Amino acid sequence: MFSRLKSIAGFKCPKCSVGDLFPNNDFFDFKFQVNKSCPHCKEDFVREPGFYYGAMFLSYIISAFFSLAVCGICIIGFNIEWRLSIVILIAILAILFVYLFRFSRSLWLHLMVKGK
Ligand SMILES: [Zn+2]
């Protein structure tokens, strides 16, 4: 279970947990294309055209709950005004945008492909 979560967050292959899901794992690399297959075990990462549309909905759900959590912590935890909380949220989302995008694709692929 923990290794599966580590594989999702580290953008690794759902089958072997060794091969990288993306060609480059730099935090601020704005290339969103997934590798066509696993460099290690040759697992197909692009199952069909439009396979990652589901990841878009996952990204939306994750971002919504993340936004609620950040605003809730700012408003309730730190007693910050709601407008400033929104500004803080936008700044955090702008920084984490690439990571959340990649995380949702990784999570989607791990949900669809049975691991070892
Ligand atoms: Zn693999």
Image (spheres, rainbow, N blue to C red):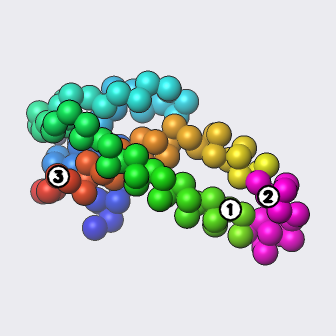
Q: Residue at x 42, y 41 (%)?
A: 102
Percent coordinates x, y for residue 60 in the rendering: 48, 53
Q: Which residues are magenta?
A: 73-86
Q: Residues within 10 Å of mark 3 (few under 14, many from 20)?
A: some
Using the image, determine if residue 60 lies above or below residue 51.
below
Sequence-first disc among 2 and 1: 1
Q: Is residue 116 magenta?
A: no
Q: CA distance from mark 2 to mark 1?
A: 8 Å
Does residue 38 show up?
Answer: no
Marks 1 & 3, CB-CB < 8 Å contact: no
Residue type at mark 1 is Val
For ligand 1, the image quadrant comes to top left
Q: Residue at x 64, y 66 (%)?
A: 69
Q: Which residue is mark 1?
A: 70
Residue type at mark 3 is Val
The residue tagged with tag 3: helix, strand or loop?
loop
Q: Which residue is mark 3?
A: 113
Residue type at mark 2 is Ser
